[in-house]
Amino acid sequence: MIWLLAAATAAPLTLQEVLASVDERVPEVASAMASQVEANAKVLAARGYTDPRTSAMAGAYGGKDPRQVAALDVSADTLWGPKVRGGWRMGLGDFPDYDGDRITPQGGELFVSGTLPLLSGLGLSDARVAVLVARAGVDMAEAKLQERTLDVRFAAASAYLDWVAKGEKALVEQTLLEQVESRQQALARQVEEGTRPRLSLLDNERVLLQRRDALARAEQDIQLAALELSLWYRDVDGQPLVPDSTQLPRLEQTSLPLPTLESDEELATARPELRLADALLRAAGTERSAATNRMLPGLNLKTELIRPVDASAEPELFGGAELTIAPMMRRQRGQRAQADATVQRLRALRRAAADRARNDVRAARVRIETALKRVAWTQLAQERATEVVELERRRFALGAGDLFQLLVRESSLAGARKQAVDALLEHELARATRTRALGNLP
């Protein structure tokens, strides 16, 4: 076939080239990267809780108690709980008792005030909790990005190896087809010469048609595998690249020795699933600490320094305390119980993820070891089948063999070669599975 001839001169597509395109060009990875940007934006938004706020107000009342009010102030909350506020205010006219505004000297007054929580809210303000949870969200997004990238790279490696294996099987079919076609011509001459019965020609022609059918299906499998591979193999613009059959490489066995099981299990502790579980636990732990803090009474110290603009007026200093108690605390107790349950649930999931990581590493090594045995056995079986076919062909050429027996042995050879391809594919896939189990990015 043309593609087999071109494959001899075309540069084969390597796994490294495929994996090099597994970045933001792949939609699944781009989606996870967008989630990471979103998580960082949430941190920025959470930090905005402590941004200074400026407000200004001016107005006048008519009627029984005419008065004018105006204010300009700047306030800010801190991550650790204290709040500060300062600015200028003015109140002139007649103020009734129910009005919360106050009369000020002519020109208004400057003020600076602060609130310091001593129990609930100290060290774990809502603003700080939001920032800590948002930071944990960034770690979650990074872990999810790594996990998604690992999954996509594993899918790309699997698709690539499947495509290469399909090419190997097509090569098996092509080689056997050429041998049957060559024998068909020789048999046609022998039938004309009367040295072979027509039955042999018909039987060989039957197998010839079957081989053509098998090759057509094998070439279809290559095209379908190439389409699957194109989901991960993309050009610079992110468009899927369908590799041509001329780019097919040979399927080769990885010969790198395996590290010890202990070192593999140690590496697996850095898997993104475990990083994600740790980030979730940090966020839940922060929520639990905040829920515990909210169960404390609200005790706030308040102070305010007032300095009239009119220099002839005396400055004032206010100091006081405010105590708030919720005797039943049903909301606080419910939040704490919910946070405790969340932490327990996530700890259990974290243990399950760690167990799964160790199990995946061990399972991958079992698959590799079994696949290595299968590779050795199937390659030996292929060698024996090849030797048997060669001997049978010699017998047939000398007129002592039977065509039907030769065709059966050639069919067995095709099966042996495909089994060898399957075993080699299984070994390479097991290697890729181990890499994914370790949480590595090859």
Image (cartoon, helix red, strand yellow):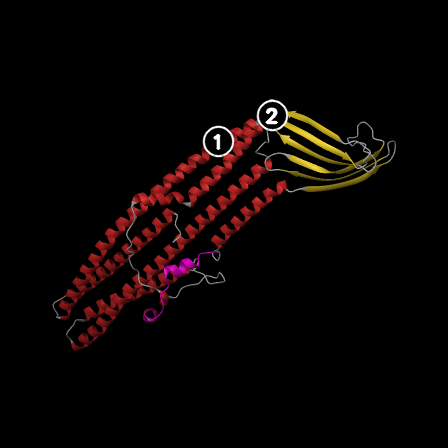
Q: Residue furthest front?
A: 312
Q: Amino acid at mark 1?
A: Ala
Q: Is residue 22 magenta?
A: yes
Q: Which residue is mark 2?
A: 297
Left or right for 304, reference 133: right
Q: Is residue 291 above or below residue 208?
A: above
**Residue 348: horizontal and vertical position, in percent?**
42, 35
Q: Amino acid at mark 2?
A: Pro
Taking depth in this image into account, of 109 and 39 the one nearest to the observer is 109
**Residue 53: horizontal and vertical position, in percent?**
68, 42
Q: Are marks 1 and 2 in contact (CB under 8 Å)?
A: no
The mark found on residue 137 in the picture is none
Q: Residue furthest right?
A: 64
**Residue 352: horizontal and vertical position, in percent?**
39, 38
Determine whether the residue tagged by mark 1 lies in a helix, strand or loop. Answer: helix
Mark in front: 1 vs 2: 2
Q: CA distance from mark 1 to mark 2?
A: 23 Å
Q: Say how many tags the image has.
A: 2
Q: Is residue 95 above or below residue 37?
A: above
Q: Which residue is mark 1?
A: 341
Q: Residue at x 31, y 43 (%)?
A: 262
Taking depth in this image into account, of 153 and 96 the one nearest to the observer is 96
- Residue 228 visible in the shown view: no
Q: Residue furthest top?
A: 327
**Residue 427: horizontal and vertical position, in percent?**
29, 53
Q: Is residue 353 magenta?
A: no
Q: Residue at x 51, y 41 (%)?
A: 136
Q: Which residues are magenta?
A: 5-23
Within the image, what quadrant is residue 253 found in?
Answer: bottom left
